[in-house]
Structure formats: structure tokens, C-alpha cells
Image (cartoon, grey):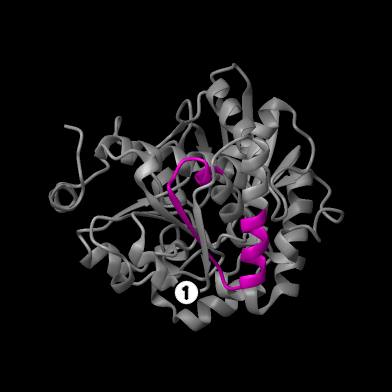
Amino acid sequence: MAKFAFLIHPLTLEDVWRPIPEARNKRPEVIRQFLLWMDPFETAYISFKTKAGVQLEGWFISVPMLPEDFITNEQLAIEKVLKAANLAKELGAEVLGLGAYTSVIGNSAQKLGDKIPLPITSGASYTVAASLEVTYRVFNQLGVPLKELSAAVVGATGAIGRVTSFLLSKDVKRLCLIARNLSRLEYVRGEILSWLKNRGIEAPVIEISTDLKLLSTCDLTIAATSSTGNLIKPEILPPGSVVCDVSLPGDVSQEVKRNRKDVLVIEGGLIKLPEIPKLVSKYSDSWEKLMGYPEGVVLACMAETMLMAAEGIHENYSIGRNISPEKVERMKKLAEKHGMEVYGVPDRDKLIPEDFLKVFKTLKRGISN
């Protein structure tokens, strides 16, 4: 039996209210303060068998803090993550996944590695693989070759954004790297150019900027920052563009989703497990109410932790900013072996709304029927 644990935390107050409806009666500031006082706790237990026949069991452990508190009170966040890691060890986990902001603190978790008593991962490698797969399938269904695309990566110097930029660079005609630090962006651009040259791949035009307005010139945007959400506003996205939002909380503002029917926003990094897991939780018997996703669907970062346990990979994996494209490819192959599939791909699910298709047909060169 392979065993894992995964750290989660509420991204918004809605994540608190969903499993605990009575909390809606409390003032937001009271709930936030109460979360800061709480210690980590076991939220749920799951078990299932992979396609390769490996029996998996694991625990989701809540680190009770909201995203903004991970940033403003990092020391408390580190203390809570270490307590949660020790709880995971006590429960019997062999691998620990750091979800959302638990992987951001401590210099992208690098400072935590020696203190945590288990092999850890942020799950970024499989998150990148899954996000690119669903994105590429969208453009395949739209009938637009990748080599005709201008693409942007927001958060290009972060762990997910950097390796995404490497992999996108070999497929598109123009790549825009966007982040807050211009010198880091210049360094990443140099890394990408060297990586492409060593493989004999012709480099696209690569632009760097700290200004999100550059998105107005791009067909595709991959959003992968560690901001606290709502970074990308409606006015900076061009009609007919596609945005894959990999961030938690999401980088794309709710106004885009509500008001820009001419922009397609897809959520990156959702994975369908090979079978519906057994769920045990005192907070809810409903997977959707507890996790916020359809039954048997998990985030790719969670799935990477499960894959590490299933394969007996007992080493730190997707930690730090310098995740390699080879690690992404390895996770993709392991997912195929164990029967994990990207959820929401357009040839299996109705992902592209008719409203967007109508706009796209009037703007783009061709569409597959």
C-alpha cells in the first residue's frame, strides 16, 4: 500500500463555507482570525487503485490560513506547514505534497526541505504537463497550428511559469515572458535560448516585459503567478484569445469570466483519477462539497504527489524555481501508466462555448469542424 499526504488551505472564504455552511453567519474578519489561531488538522482520507494496480491511500491535511496571510505572516505559515508535515508523518504518509501557498513560502519551499520529515513536492511538474495538454487540445480543436500563435506566460520567472515557458518556446512563433523582475526575465530568456540551441530547435521571437498590457497582442496566455488573484482584467485581453489559468487563487478576474464571452478561460491542471476514490471525512461525505471539484477530479499537484507515492519516488521533486522540462515529461508518462487523465479536454468534454466559437470564427483564419 502506497501512502501520501497533501496539504491544502482555503483559497477564499467560500472554501470555508462550503463544508461548514454555518460559518456563513460569522463576520469574515472573525473567521480569518479564527483560522490564524487554529492548528493544522486532518480533513479527509481517500483510497483508490491505479491502472497499474497500485493501491493508494492518503490524507488531505488543512493548513488553516487564507492566501494573503501566507504572504503577510510567513513565519506563522512556516510553523503551521511544519506542524502539518509532522502530522502527515504520524499518519503514515511516505510522500508529502504542498498545495497552493504552502509551496510558495520559504523561497518556494526550498528552506523547508531539511525541516520536513518526508520527501516533498509542489506538484508543479504534472501541473505544467496537464495545463499544456488541455491548452494544446483547445487550439487543435479550433484548427489553429501552434506555430501560428503568439503566446504569453504571466509569472514567467516562477516555478510553473519558467518551465512552461521552456516548453512553449519550441512550439509557438512568438513568446512573451511577463513578470515583476526584469533582470530575472532576461535571465530566463537566456536560459530558454540556450536550451533551444542545444537541442537544435529554432527559437521564436521572445519578448520580456513587466507590463500586462502586452497580453493585448497575444492569442494565448498562460497565467501562473503566486499573486492573491484577480490580476488579469477584462480590458487587457484581445477578442478571440484563450487564457489557461494555472494559479490558485486564479489570476483571471471574475469580470473576465462574466463579461468577456469573446475570451475563453480554461482552468489548467485538473486531473481525473482512474477510479472514484473512497472518501472518509467528518466534514462532508460529498467530494464536490469538500474539494470543490467533480467526483474523482483532483488538482494536478495532488495527482503528482499520488504518482510519487505509487512509484516509490522518495525524494524532493518539484521544489524551487528551476524545475526541468525532463521532470515534466516524466510525470506525464507516469500519469499515463497509472491511468490519470487530464480533465476538461475538448475532444472528451464540451469545453469550448458556442459564444466564443462564433467570435473566434470571425477573427481567426480557420476552424476545424
Q: Where does the image place residue 275, in percent across and percent down from the top left?
A: 46, 26
Give the camera-side residue of 15 and 72: 72
Q: Is residue 11 left or right of residue 41?
A: left
The answer to whether residue 270 of the structure is visible from this angle is no
In the picture, measured across the screen, residue 73 lies left or right of residue 220, that is: right
* Image point (28%, 63%), residue name: 238
Which secondary structure lies at badge 1?
Answer: loop
Above or below residue 92? Residue 88 is below
- At horizontal 58% and vertical 43% (from top left) the residue drawn is 302
Q: Which residue is farthest right?
A: 114
Disc 1: which residue: 211
Q: Is residue 185 magenta?
A: yes
Left or right relative to 239: residue 35: right
- Between 195 and 100, which is closer to the camera in this rendering? 195
Q: Measuring 53% from the left and 24% from the top, which residue is drawn there?
A: 336
Which x, y percent locates residue 65? 60, 69
Q: Position of residue 279 (x, y in %)?
A: 51, 38
In the image, which residues are magenta? 167-190
Q: Residue at x 50, y 45 (%)?
A: 168
Instruction: Count neighbours of disc 1 (C-alpha within 10 A) and say few if under 14, some if 14 to 19, many if 20 or more.
Output: few
Q: Amino acid at mark 1?
A: Asp
In the image shown, does 260 or 286 lie closer to the viewer? 260
Q: Is residue 181 magenta?
A: yes
Residue 47 in which image quadrant = top right
The quadrant of the image that shows the N terminus is: top right
Instruction: For the C terminus, give its image quadrant.
Output: top left
Q: Position of residue 229 (x, y in %)?
A: 46, 69
Left or right side of 84 for 245? left
129 versus 16 height, above or below: above
